[in-house]
Amino acid sequence: MSYSDMVKRIALIFEGILQFVLFSNAYIALCAVMMCQTTARLFKLNLPASSLAFLFAGTLGSYSLHWYLTDSSIDSTNRGRWNQTHKQTLLGLFIGAVLVGLWLLVYLQAYVLDLLPVVLLTFLYSAPKINWRLFSILRRIAVFKSIYLALIWTYVTAALPLLMAIPVQPTSWVLIGTWLINRFLLIYSIALWFDYRDRATDRQSKWLTIASMLTETQIRWFFYGLTLCFGLTIAILYRQWLNVWPVVCLSVPMALLGLTIRRIATQPSDYGYYLYVDGLLMLSGILLEFGPTS
């Protein structure tokens, strides 16, 4: 085997591993866990150890079901081809995640009433893809799908930790509300650019989204409006609660998104979206590990 052949083989192995991590939904599940950890760290919450494992399994199962139900037969992207050839893998991951989640619920019985809404809401996100009349009705309101998804993520990663554990320091409802809005704005801003990438497909399938109904210029101004609102929530959090380092950590993902949207919009890449854009969700949590939160 020549040197060039060996390099190509190593590159193919690395790409295969990367594709599995990204397209099996393990990566996005890790992002959810890190966002939950961000809330726990900033509010000094003592979460049950099994809750993060449940969150990982729940996210993995939800996304695996979603992509299993997605028809990728005419999708020529890296993800589309991977999904089409790994349908059984996605189904197996979904079943495995459900079984693990049910087992973890035994240790989280005290929080069942907080967790069950998550299960229902995440199922409803993928339900329109099921070819049953009852579920197909949901396609008529698909314009709100990214807002709905962002609300689910906000509940799971920002609200649920506060429901499961009492903050060490007294916390006002105004502060909690600002935190939830801040998280929603970041999550939805990221989801917006996935909608922008898929706008042509959404228009053809009649699953209209906000991004598919706006022009490119309007989408950018809409994003800048979201960014401004995000900045206002950061200012409130800094004035009432956070120190400089946490504020920097929370601001960096939105700043990077704003600085790179032109390249994201003009050079759509599966790796760019699923590795970089999705990765912005957990960047604050990673950065927080390198400095004080108070």
Image (cartoon, grey):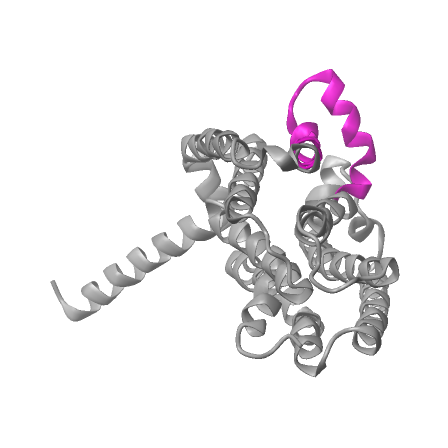
Q: Residue at x 56, y 59 (%)?
A: 34
Closer-to-camera residue (156/278):
156
Q: Position of residue 116 (x, y in %)?
A: 67, 32
User: To which quarter of the image does residue 8 belong?
Assistant: bottom left
- Tell me which segment is drawn in magenta: 117-145
Q: Is residue 147 magenta?
A: no
- The percent coordinates of residue 137 (x first, y second) are 79, 24
Quarter of the image where the N terminus is located: bottom left
Q: Is residue 210 visible?
A: yes
User: Residue 211's x, y, as percent?
Assistant: 79, 53
Position of residue 203 measured from the top left corner of the image (x, y, whole percent):
76, 42
Q: Residue at x 82, y 31 (%)?
A: 140
Residue located farthest toward the bottom when viewing the structure as drawn: 244
- Of residues 205 and 166, the one nearer the viewer is 166
Relative to residue 53, is residue 154 drawn left or right?
right
Quadrant for residue 205, please give it: top right
Res 73 seen here: no
Q: Is residue 218 above or below residue 198?
A: below
Pick out the residue farthest to the top.
Answer: 133
- The image quadrant that residue 216 belongs to is bottom right
Total tally of numbered discs in the picture:
0
Q: Which image quarter holds the C terminus?
A: bottom right
Residue for point 52% across, 29% down? 102
- Type of secondary structure dominating the magenta stretch: helix
In this rendering, would 258 be left or right of 25? right
Vertically, is 156 above or below 67?
below
Membership of 139 in magenta stretch: yes
